[in-house]
Amino acid sequence: MPNMVQPYLELSGIQKTFGTGLLQTEALGHIDLSVVEGEFLAIVGPSGCGKSTLLQIAAGLTPASAGTVHFNGLAVNEPPPGIVYLFQQYGNSLFPWRTVLANVAFAVEHKPGMTRDRARAHSLLYLEMVGLADVAHRYPWQLSGGMQQRVTIARALAAEPRILLMDEPFSSVDALTRLELHALVLDLWTRHRFTAVLVTHDVDEAVFLADRIVVLSSRPSKVSKVIDTALPRPRDSIGTSESARFLSLRHEILSMLLGRPA
């Protein structure tokens, strides 16, 4: 894991309240959270605790009711360049009238000096990385769910993010496809070393992918604990998940989420 020197993404005193008066709901109580450049951080917590809301605040997509967000030392009040958000509903985030290649190219085609040919060549490179170069000229609706999610990953990485924020991106695919996508994301993260923040309800997924895991409490949520996974890399979907350390972490986090003694 990277050295804990200077926070790359820093959330300080984040609170979020929805509604007013009797209908007011406090989703996020008071959250302080730092992400180090190059690390893979996962956020878990009980259902409805505001994990996705916290990620949207970090991305500048939703304003906090209180607190501040800083990315690389600058205040985040709107989506900043360098942060890319990968949504859960991959089908809704792809343009059905665009080909797979054109969907990926959308991430870069508006950059200054980017010609159409350069955008297509750049995008094809990332489609090759996710194993979809051979379907570049198909349309999203012609692909399986797992393949569509690969397209969204290729598009996110084609933008060359400094931070990739992922909101339960694997929850809508079957178990085997999920394992394949885990391996793909880890391989791409290892090669490109972008900073990754993953929100997930799946404890096994968080332990397998992350360097550190932030465990949130129930609503109004606070940080209950930050856990260093200390699992060696590279990781294997079978060997890692059967290791004593993996099982110990899984037990500890599930016990916290279920309110049971560890």
Image (cartoon, rainbow, N blue to C red):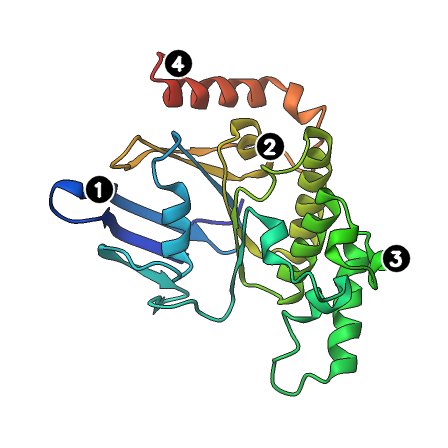
Circle 2 sits in a helix, a strand or a loop, which is it? helix
- Calculate the distance from the C-alpha at mark 4 to the C-alpha at mark 1: 28 Å
Name the element at disc 1.
strand
Residue drawn 55% across the image and 46% down it? 88
7 relative position to 31: left or right: right
Residue topped by disc 4: 262
Among the two numbered marks 3 and 2 on one chain, the one whose residue lies closer to the N terminus? 3
Q: CA distance from mark 1 to mark 2?
A: 31 Å
Q: Position of residue 107 (x, y in %)?
A: 63, 69
Q: Quadrant of residue 108?
A: bottom right
Residue 135: x and y in percent read 84, 57
Of 143 and 202, the residue lying toward us: 143
User: Which is more foreground, mark 1 or mark 2?
Assistant: 1
| Callout 3: SS | helix
Q: Earlier in the sequence, mark 3 or mark 1?
A: 1
Amino acid carrying label 2: it is Phe
**Left or right: where 246 falls relative to 242:** left
Q: Which residue is mark 3?
A: 134
Q: Residues within 10 Å of mark 2 (few under 14, many from 20)?
A: many
The mark that comes first in sequence, 4 or 2, is 2
Q: Residues within 10 Å of mark 1 (few under 14, many from 20)?
A: some
Asked whether residue 7 is in view, the answer is no
**Residue under the point 56% across and 27% down:** 204
Q: Are marks 3 and 2 in contact (CB under 8 Å)?
A: no
Whether residues under marks 3 and 1 lie with C-beta atoms below 8 angstroms apart, the answer is no
